[in-house]
C-alpha cells in the first residue's frame, strides 16, 4: 500500500512539495537521477527489451541510487512503449519508491484542455491513484491556466508539478524564446511564481511552493536574457541536460546564477551507463552529485 505523504491530515497542516523536497535535499544533496530505460541501455545491462527487463532495471536503479538522490525521475515514455505491462512496471516502481521514502517525479509532460487535464491530474497526483507520483512534469502549450486541475490538486495533496519553461533541447528556442520580454518562457515563470506566493493557501508565504519549472542546464544565459527572475520563483527548478546533453557545473552556474539553491540538476544516461552493478551505479551518482555541489 502506498504511504500517505507526511502530515496529510488537513490542507493547511500538509507540507508543500517544495518543503518536502527541501527536507530531502538537506540529507541527500540536490541531484535528481532520471530513470530512462532505453533499449540500448537495457542491452548494455544484459537485460531484454521487455517489461521484465524494464522492471529489473527500474528496481535496480531505485535500490542503488535512491538513497543518494533527492528524487528519481522515471521517463514515462520509456514505460509507455511497453504498453499496459510497461505502465504496470511504472506503478510498481512508484509504490516501491514511496515505501523506500524516495521522492519521484513522473516525467510525463502532460497538458490538455482543462476537462481532460482534470483526468491527467487525477492519474498522476491523486491520493490512491496507481500512478500517483510526488510530482509530474507538465506542458503549458495550451496555456498555463489550462493546467489548473493539476496545480490545485498538487497544492491540496502536498505533491508538485514542474512546468516546462526553457527546455534543454535546441529546438525549444523557436517557441520558448520568441518575443524578448514577452516570451512564453517568461510568462510561464511569472505565472508559476504567482502560484507559489502563498503555497498552501494558508497565508504562509515563506514556504517553498508546489509549482516548479523545468529549465534545462544547457540553456546558457537564456533565463537572464529573457527576464525570467528565477530566484523569485519560490519553488524548485528541474534542470535536465547534465551529462549526456553536455552540461556540467560551469553550465549550471551560467544558467542559474543566484537561483542555484533552487535547482535540481538532473542526469539520466550518463549515470545509468555505469551498468547494473549496484556499487558502481551508486558511485556514479555520488560522483555526479558531489561534482555539481
Ligand atoms: O527540457 C527537458 C525536459 C526533459 N528532459 C528529459 O530529461 C531526461 C534527460 O536524459 P539524459 O539522458 O540525461 O539526457 C530525458 O528523459 C528527457 O526526456 C530533457 O532532457 N530536457
Image (cartoon, helix red, strand yellow):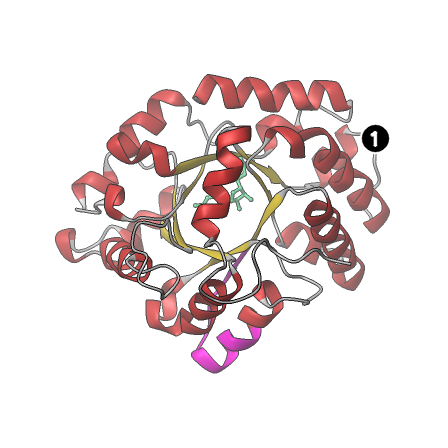
Q: Is residue 90 above or below residue 269?
A: below
Residue at (37%, 71%) from the top-left corner?
A: 142
- Magenta extent: 108-119
Q: Position of residue 193 (x, y in %)?
A: 28, 55
Q: Nearer the viewer, residue 44 or 63?
A: 63
Quarter-wise, where is residue 85 in the image? bottom right
Q: Residue at x 45, y 40 (%)?
A: 22
Quarter-of-image position of residue 287: top right
Find out whether residue 113 is within the magenta segment.
yes
Bin the neighbour count of mark 1 within 10 Å (Cα to Cα): few under 14, some 14-19, many 20 and up: few
Q: Residue at x 66, y 35 (%)?
A: 66
Residue 211 falls in which quadrant of the image?
A: bottom left
Q: 64 above or below 201?
A: above
Question: Would you place residue 293 above or below residue 220 in this image?
Answer: above
* Residue at numbered disc 1: 46
On the question of residue 244 being in view, the answer is no
Q: Is residue 71 left or right of residue 257?
A: right
The image shows residue 111 at horizontal and vertical percentages of: 46, 67
* Quarter containing the C terminus: top left
Residue at (42% x, 56% y) in the render: 210
- Looking at the image, residue 74 sits to the left or right of residue 174; the answer is right
Q: Position of residue 79 (x, y in %)?
A: 70, 53
Q: Is residue 135 left or right of residue 130?
A: left
* 60 is higher (above) or lower (below) than 135: above
Counting from the top left corner in percent of width and height, residue 134 is at 57, 53
Quarter containing the N terminus: bottom right
Amino acid at each position: 500500500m502506498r504511504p500517505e505523504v507526511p502530515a496529510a491530515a488537513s490542507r493547511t497542516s500538509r507540507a508543500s512539495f517544495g518543503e518536502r523536497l527541501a527536507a530531502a535535499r538537506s540529507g541527500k544533496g540536490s541531484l535528481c537521477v532520471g530513470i530512462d530505460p532505453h533499449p540500448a541501455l537495457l542491452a548494455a545491462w544484459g537485460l531484454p527489451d521487455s517489461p521484465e527487463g524494464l522492471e529489473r532495471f527500474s528496481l535496480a536503479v531505485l535500490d542503488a541510487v535512491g538513497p543518494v538522490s533527492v528524487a528519481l525521475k522515471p521517463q514515462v515514455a520509456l514505460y509507455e512503449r511497453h504498453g499496459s505491462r510497461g505502465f504496470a512496471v511504472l506503478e510498481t516502481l512508484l509504490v516501491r519508491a514511496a515505501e523506500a521514502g524516495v521522492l519521484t517525479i513522473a516525467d510525463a509532460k502532460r497538458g490538455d484542455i482543462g476537462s481532460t487535464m482534470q483526468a491527467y491530474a487525477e492519474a498522476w497526483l491523486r491520493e490512491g491513484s496507481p500512478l500517483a507520483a510526488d510530482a509530474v512534469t507538465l506542458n503549458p502549450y495550451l496555456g498555463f491556466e489550462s493546467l489548473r486541475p493539476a496545480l490545485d490538486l498538487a497544492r491540496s495533496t502536498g505533491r508538485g508539478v514542474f512546468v516546462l519553461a526553457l527546455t534543454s533541447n535546441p529546438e525549444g528556442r523557436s517557441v520558448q524564446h520568441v518575443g524578448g520580454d514577452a516570451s512564453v518562457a517568461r510568462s510561464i515563470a511569472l505565472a508559476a511564481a504567482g502560484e507559489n506566493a502563498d503555497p498552501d493557501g494558508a497565508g504562509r508565504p515563506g514556504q517553498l511552493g508546489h509549482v516548479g519549472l523545468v529549465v534545462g542546464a544547457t540553456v546558457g544565459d537564456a533565463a537572464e536574457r529573457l527576464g525570467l527572475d528565477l530566484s523569485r520563483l519560490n519553488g524548485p527548478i528541474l534542470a535536465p541536460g547534465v551529462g549526456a546533453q553536455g552540461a556540467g557545473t560551469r553550465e549550471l552556474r551560467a544558467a542559474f546564477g543566484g537561483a542555484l539553491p533552487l535547482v535540481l540538476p538532473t542526469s539520466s544516461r550518463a549515470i545509468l551507463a555505469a551498468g547494473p552493478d549496484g556499487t558502481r551505479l551508486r558511485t556514479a551518482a555520488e560522483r555526479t552529485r558531489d561534482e555539481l555541489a
